[in-house]
Amino acid sequence: MNAPVPEWQGEGSSRIPFWAYTRDDLYQRELERFFYNGHWCYVGLEAEVPNPGDFLRTAIGERSVILVRDKDGALCVVENRCAHRGMRFCRERSGNRADFTCPYHQWNYSLKGDLQGVPFRRGVRQDGVVQGGMPADFNPAEHGLTKLEVAARGGVVFASFDPDVEPFEQFVGPEVLPWFDRLFNGRKLVLLGHSRQRIPGNWKLMQENIKDPYHPGLLHTWFVTFGLWRADNRARLQMDRHHRHAAMISTRGNAGRAGEATSGVSSFKAAMTLNDDRFLDVVPEAWWNGPSAVMTTIFPSLILQQQVNSVSTRHIQPRGPDSFDFVWTHFGFDDDTPEMTRRRLRQANLFGPAGFVSADDGEVIESSQQSFRADDRASTLAELGGRAVEDTDHMVSETLIRGMYRYWRGVMEV
Amino acid sequence: MLDPARYVELLRLYADYAAVLDAGDWNRWPDYFTDPCSYVLQPRENHDRGLPLATMAFESRGMLKDRAYGISQTLFHDPYYQRHVVGVPRVLRLDGDDIHAETNYAVFRTKPSEFSTVFNVGRTIDVVRPTPEGLRFASRRIVFDSELIPNSIIYPL
């Protein structure tokens, strides 16, 4: 059994106790309060279920859900849990169905999740006598699959178990929504594929990774050396009013050596050149409206990536306090030329579980969790740029992490 | 039908390739490819659905060299050993001098102070071409069954 949750030391959110990453009781509370209530979670792209009957099995928190396009074209999300005996009945990752049937006792559901067939509901006649059957007051309307709230915007689909969840646009907020809409501006998305990795660390560390503009120009040699993301880039950090979502907005600046951004930075390699520079064959696109990289966190489940020409969604699926699955969905747009598609795929080498810049994010998360697990009494420090929670017009700050933990403390009552 | 001497050469290519990777000799890895070439490491899920996204996708010896440099100089990672176990190549067809072949493989990973674990399992779909230096891969598509990557893949397979 867990001891009571220790008291958070200090008023602010700039020192995060290691136990925030390790305790099972807090993790269960996070699932309830962030993933299953009050928040919209990512489920997939409309482009993954283009036709009526197309479905995609995915997850919200630890619960398995199915995104499906109904016969009338509507997007539905239902829980992958039979209302009879609780079986997780959908085993395929994706496909096309006219309806759902649980193999255990063949309870049958419409794509919307309504129960439409129960074998032997009215019993079985034997020797002129009806045997068994469901009670007379059995009402199929009460035994459908769990139906989730659904919001789709710009081809991206979110769902919530919470019937009282606020409207999606309000949830994201007017500060961050424009950055969402910049990437998903109504063009049809084209699916390029998925990458899946299991990272042995707490799920919040991945949110923090994309709320931390401090590390990319230090950990990631490619970012600092080629000027893709580093401390002297023109940048803004912007949060929603709850400080749970954020956008890190950056415009590619200098490559090569330049003042404090590179001096003493051991990962900066002035003499490094690529043998094949097609990895970084960057072509600015009109929809960028300037920034060459915008990394957006939609709390708790999603990261949106635009790094030059590579765009993806990254889906956080927690699996206990010490592990999460991280699913990347790379896409393009239906007006992309073949050259642009090829460019997006080449630049995808920078990202994902083997990416020139992303592979080490998973590695540092694993290494951090090892410390947290060994002794949860210490704390991390996130005080670059001070201890306040505020938007900035530079990236030399950990304010977004502080913002997230201010929000976390409030919702978690910690 | 591949003549036996050529088949032995093919076996040597596969054995040497695995040996170089298992020795961590990254700078020699590009030598096993033609230039240009195709090296694609891809989840089976994408391959089977005809989706192009790969975990790594390189098109030249230069790109392979950039990866080798990345491993030793730019990517922070937990060091680990790899051990390839590669099945007997199955020659599918000959196309001029090119040999189209497939192999099954399993790669085990051993991290410092840890047990050896199954890291990645799948098959390779290869086009092998005779060159003055011997047989080389013109194309290697490594399609892995493994549904999840255990955190990261740093070294080539």
Image (cartoon, coloured by chain):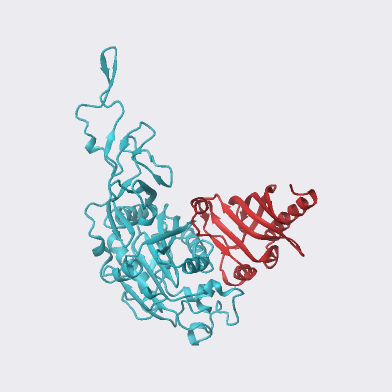
Q: Position of residue A166 (x, y in %)?
A: 22, 59
Corner quadrant of residue A300: bottom left
Q: Is A151 drawn above or below residue A173 in the view shown?
A: above
Q: Nearer the viewer, residue A220 or A187?
A: A187
In the displayed structure image, the side of residue B109 where residue A17 appears, left or right: left
> Can residue B24 be seen in the rendering of this structure?
yes
**Residue found at x 34% / y 35%:** A85
Image quadrant where one finds the C terminus of chain B? bottom right
Q: Position of residue A316 (x, y in %)?
A: 40, 58
**Residue found at x 39% / y 65%:** A304
**Residue found at x 44% / y 83%:** A232
Which residue, as the protein is rendered here, is positioned at the far left?
Answer: A137
Q: Is A357 drawn above or below residue A130 in the view shown?
A: below
Output the letter for the chain in red: B
Q: Position of residue B11 (x, y in %)?
A: 74, 52
Q: How many dots with numbers?
A: 0
Q: Is A261 drawn above or below residue B100 in the view shown?
A: below
Q: Position of residue A307 (x, y in %)?
A: 44, 71
In the displayed structure image, the side of residue B32 where residue A277 appears, left or right: left
**Residue found at x 41% / y 46%:** A95
In the displayed structure image, the side of residue B20 where residue A355 appears, left or right: left
Which residue, as the protein is rendered here, is positioned at the far bottom?
Answer: A259
Which residue, as the protein is rendered here, is positioned at the far front?
Answer: B96
Q: Nearer the viewer, residue B156 or B2?
A: B2
* Palette colour of chain A: cyan
